[in-house]
Amino acid sequence: PPEAVPQAPEDPLFGLMRAYKADTSSNKVDLGIGAYRDNNAKPWVLPVVKKADEILRNDPELNHEYLPIAGLAPFTSKAAELLLGQSSAASAEKRVASVQTISGTGAVHLGALFLAKFYKVNGANRTVYLSNPTWANHNQIFTNVGLPIATYPYFHKETKGLDIEGMKRALADAPERSIILLHACAHNPTGVDPSPEQWREIAEVMKAKQHFPFFDTAYQGFASGDLDRDAGAIRYFIEQGFELVIAQSFAKNFGLYGERAGCFHFVSAPAPDAADVTTRVASQLAILQRSEISNPPIYGARIAATVLNDAALFAEWQENLRTMSGRIITMREALRGKLEELGTPGTWNHITDQIGMFSFTGLTEAQVAKLRSDFHIYMTKNGRISMAGLNTSNVEYVAKAIDSVVRT
Ligand code: PMP
């Protein structure tokens, strides 16, 4: 009966957004939601996306038919190439199955659903290990499909960097063949990524325990400005012969947030029957997709496909990526610089050491609350700030406010 349905809490991030919108202060600063803003605190439509949109709108053949169940092929194939590189053995050996999804969230969900149904070989452990902390949605996506979740240490509170030893120990202690969720780059919420050497160590432990890597990549190109560099961890794991899955979002790197452009990829391990395995997996993914969404949305995929399949537009996209990542890196330097100038107690090097959309500042829940009540600065209560919310007009105000709450 309906009266048995309990009230669920509001999503904290979207609640924060609502509170920010309702705030009438002219000083208010939104450091909550992970969406890029330009130096005027406005959403930025990438110039290359505008061009692709123009091309599409001028195409007299364009219609609004359904996409195939697996999505727009010129989009999914280029999406895979972006992750795996142009000379990928996995692609050449037909070991990759790609399905267009409802952005990154839909890709994580499709992967979770797929594993919930099929990850049962030889009594494998079905627990999904998530970094502590992780993107909050991971917890509920895996829980909702009935997979147990656990965590591995990730963020080191003192160094505000990676707790590599704790992470490796937890991966070594986890039962064999556990599912390990890894952020491919620009870890959300901490902005802390393993170095290439640390990725090698992580892969080594995971291989010894036959763990199953589940990569989530939502910031390729947006993190460093270099698409290949941000795919480095995924490529390394594939070269190491892992069977793995990847959830890929184009929300941030194309600024296509609401268009929901994403992909899920399955990569089988090198084996004589690998292409067959991949074909079977693709057939099952199609069934799951059909029962969930029938077929994915078309607009964002068309935009991305137009850019990804044209050399000149692709080059322009890389420029746009460098504009976004460059502005964020400049804001990291500015915030750290101002805090150090003010002599704010504590160390602030982590702000420039961290990468991508977010910085995990180390501010306490009480300090976060004070920033909101006294300074109209909004951030999640774990002290995460979206760097994109900072600009040349507000960075000093934010630094002074942080300085003030840290001192009280
Ligand atoms: N994974 C991570 C780690 C993310 O940060 C995000 C974006 N917040 C996503 C997945 C998916 O976002 P979207 O569904 O908008 O692509």
Image (cartoon, grey):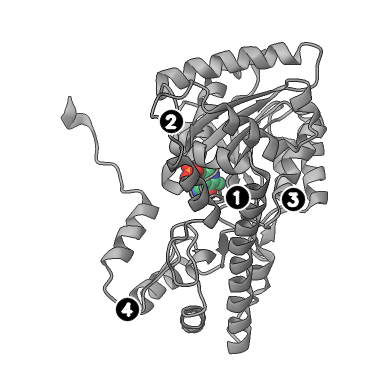
The amino acid on which the numbered mark 3 sits, given as a three-letter code, is Arg
Residue depth check, mark 2 versus mark 4: number of the one nearer the observer: 4
- Looking at the rendered structure, the kind of residue marked 1 is Tyr
Q: Residue drawn 54% across and 44% down?
A: 250
Front residue (pair 259, 278): 259
Q: Amino acid at mark 4?
A: Ser
**Badges 2 and 3: C-beta atoms under 8 Å apart?**
no
Q: What label sits on residue 144 in the rendered view?
A: 2
Question: Which of the two labelled residues, at mark 2 and mark 3, occupies the earlier sequence position?
Answer: 2
* Distance of label 4 from label 3 (alpha carbons): 39 Å
Q: CA distance from mark 1 to mark 3?
A: 11 Å
Q: Residue 216: horizontal and vertical position, in percent?
A: 60, 40
Q: Is residue 239 above or below residue 380?
A: above
Q: Which residue is mark 3?
A: 229
Neighbor class of circle 1 (other Cα within 10 Å; few <14, some 14-19, many 20+) is many
Residue in the picture at 71% in, 30% down: 211
Residue that label 1 marks: 219
- The answer to whether residue 254 is seen in the rendering is yes
Distance from mark 2 CB to nearest ligand 1 atom below 8 Å = no
Task: Determine whether the residue tagged by mark 4 lies in a helix, strand or loop.
Answer: loop
Between 399 and 288, the one nearer to me in the picture? 288
Mark found first going from the N terminus, 2 or 1 = 2
Would you call the spot at circle 4 few (<14 residues within 10 Å), some (14-19), or many (20 or more)? few
Q: Are marks 1 and 3 in contact (CB under 8 Å)?
A: no
Identify the secondary structure beneath mark 2: helix
Q: Is residue 211 left or right of residue 344?
A: right
Q: Mark 4 sits on what residue? A: 26
Quarter containing the N terminus: top left
